[in-house]
Amino acid sequence: MYIRTTTYAYNPAQADELLQLNDEHLIPRLRQLPGFVSYTYGLDPDTRRGVSITVWESREAADGFRTALGGMVQRFQLVGLVIDPSQVYEVVRQIE
């Protein structure tokens, strides 16, 4: 399994729009992608930063995530999201 982490800057005044896009468009798309396992999303209004963590069955699925989103990245950018480059890591330990 692989973890893909993405950090970003956002405007807390646009958090409702950001979360709506997330809930109505991103999450349904994620659930349809081959190799998708899970998604965690966090926001910190004090630092104006956020993080998303997705878990994938394969490196190929993790690497292909942004491409699979198509124009959705631009929709997030329109509500003020400034996305940093993502990182992909192999899961070597996991505790639940």
Image: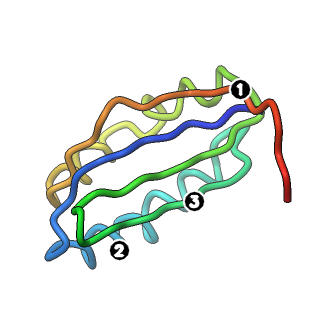
Q: Which residue is mark 1?
A: 90
By what rule are the colours in the image chosen? rainbow
Question: Is residue 79 rendered to the left or right of residue 41?
Answer: left
Q: Nearer the viewer, residue 69 or 6?
A: 6
Q: Which mark is residue 20?
A: 2
In three-dimensional space, the C-alpha distance between marks 3 and 2, rounded to whole angstroms, equals: 15 Å
In three-dimensional space, the C-alpha distance between marks 1 and 3, rounded to whole angstroms, equals: 17 Å
N-terminal of the two: label 1 or label 2? 2
Q: Who's the residue at 55% across and 24% down the image?
A: 63
SS of the residue under disc 1: strand
Against 20, residue 41 (above or below) is: above
Q: Are marks 3 and 2 in contact (CB under 8 Å)?
A: no
Q: Amino acid at mark 2?
A: Gln
Q: Who's the residue at 35% across and 57% down the image?
A: 50
Q: Amino acid at mark 3?
A: Thr
Q: Which mark is residue 40?
A: 3
The tally of labels here is 3
N-terminal of the two: label 1 or label 3? 3
Please tell me how crowded label 2 is: few (under 14), some (14-19), or many (20+) other residues with Cα within 10 Å. Answer: few
Q: Position of residue 80 (x, y in %)?
A: 14, 57
Q: Which quadrant does the N terminus fall into?
A: top right
